[in-house]
Image (cartoon, rainbow, N blue to C red):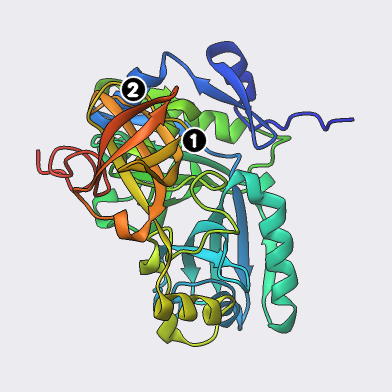
Amino acid sequence: MSRPAKRTHLHKIYSEEANMTLFAGFEMPMWFKGIISEHMAVRDTVGIFDITHMGRTVVTGPEAEAFLDYATTNDVSSLAPLSAHYSTICNKEGGIKDDFVLSRLKSEEFLLVYNATNREKDYEWLLKQSKEYDAGVEDVSNSVSMFAVQGPKAESTLQRVSEEDLSRIGRFKCGWTKIAGFRCFISRTGYTGEDGFELFVWNTPISSPDKAVKVWNTILKAGREDAIEPCGLGARDTLRLEAGMCLYDNDIDERTSPLEARLSFVVKLEKGDFIGRDALLRQKEEGVQRKRVGIHLLKSGIPRPAYEVWKNDEKIGRVTSGTFSPVLKCGIAMAYVSTEHAKTGETVAIKIRDKLVDGEIVKFPFYDPTEYGYKRKT
């Protein structure tokens, strides 16, 4: 017998306003008004997502830093309080068990936020690995609601209802504030490529959703003059793909290493021993056989996962994520191709319905970062 679908604090709102889907065991909104309109709201103004389905674990104790430095690939010792970084958890073979964001709340207190599909797996793994350390591991996923407010107007929207000066929180920095009278943890992070924040409403059990609902409605009201839109998983996926960000089980998994996935910037081999280090060190010395790339289609077509990538009558890889880009008005894809062909500017083709459609390998993000994204100049 299948388990009943899980719900977040805002399910009552979704059931009345959104087109729903099942994702990672949760009933979640796929879209409210439409994927493209929600996507462009985030690129042009501001959008808000409920991301409470994600996993959240707090690690505390005198050896919390040492434990996380051993359990993850990035350098936890360099992370100052109220700062965050992106990282990965690897298995002994160097495959990615998950990717996540780690925030240091205090000297001996950390918050990990990881993928919804891996909530139980990651928590159990962290709990097991922590046994040799003086560190506590607590799953707070069901007692903390989580929203993402993303887009060039994200700061102005949240500033109207925040008691703290949000301009003081830089990218991948964190802080505490009050919204709608409730204490919230806030980090300048996100999964869209845009500027924005992820907001955690602390001490909010699923059984008592009123605080989460009030914060959500307060932010929506505050964002009206910025044309805020509630957004679903559909826009979240197209936004992250345009930004060149991986989706677990599509673009990365336990058979994929961070070096193959072009995530070597989160692998600090020099920091000392960590799980997967030996395998990743060998990979770095020997070189990888394939690499993750972005492909911009030069002709009409929409690439999908598992589509083949070709070059000169030779199959050189396959697509792991693909969509129609609302910004570029063309098909884009994330794919793994043989390393010899993983060069920016290389022309390739994607096989779509038995037809080879020309494309070009491009750098991430797919869009012009001077016009869109957190680095925009306009």
Q: Is residue 250 above or below residue 11?
A: below
Q: Of helix, strand and loop, which one carries label 1?
A: loop
- Which quadrant, please, contains the N terminus? top right
Furthest residue in direction right, as rendered: 1
Q: Position of residue 296 (x, y in %)?
A: 26, 36
Q: Position of residue 252 (x, y in %)?
A: 51, 52
- Amino acid type at circle 1 is Pro
Q: Which mark is residue 305?
A: 1
- Reading the image, the residue beneath label 2 is 301
- Amino acid type at circle 2 is Gly
Between 284 and 276, the one lying in front of the other is 284
Question: What residue do we see at 66% from left, 58% from top?
Answer: 122
* Viewer can see residue 48: no
Sort mark 1 into few (<14), some (14-19) or many (20+) by Cα contacts within 10 Å. some
Label 2 to label 1: alpha-carbon separation: 13 Å
Position of residue 87 in the picture relative to residue 192 (left or right): right
* Viewer can see residue 274: yes
Question: What residue do we see at 61% from left, 39% from top?
Answer: 53
Image quarter of residue 287: bottom left
Question: What residue do we see at 40% from left, 62% from top?
Answer: 263
Image quarter of residue 13: top right
Between 214 and 357, the one lying in front of the other is 357
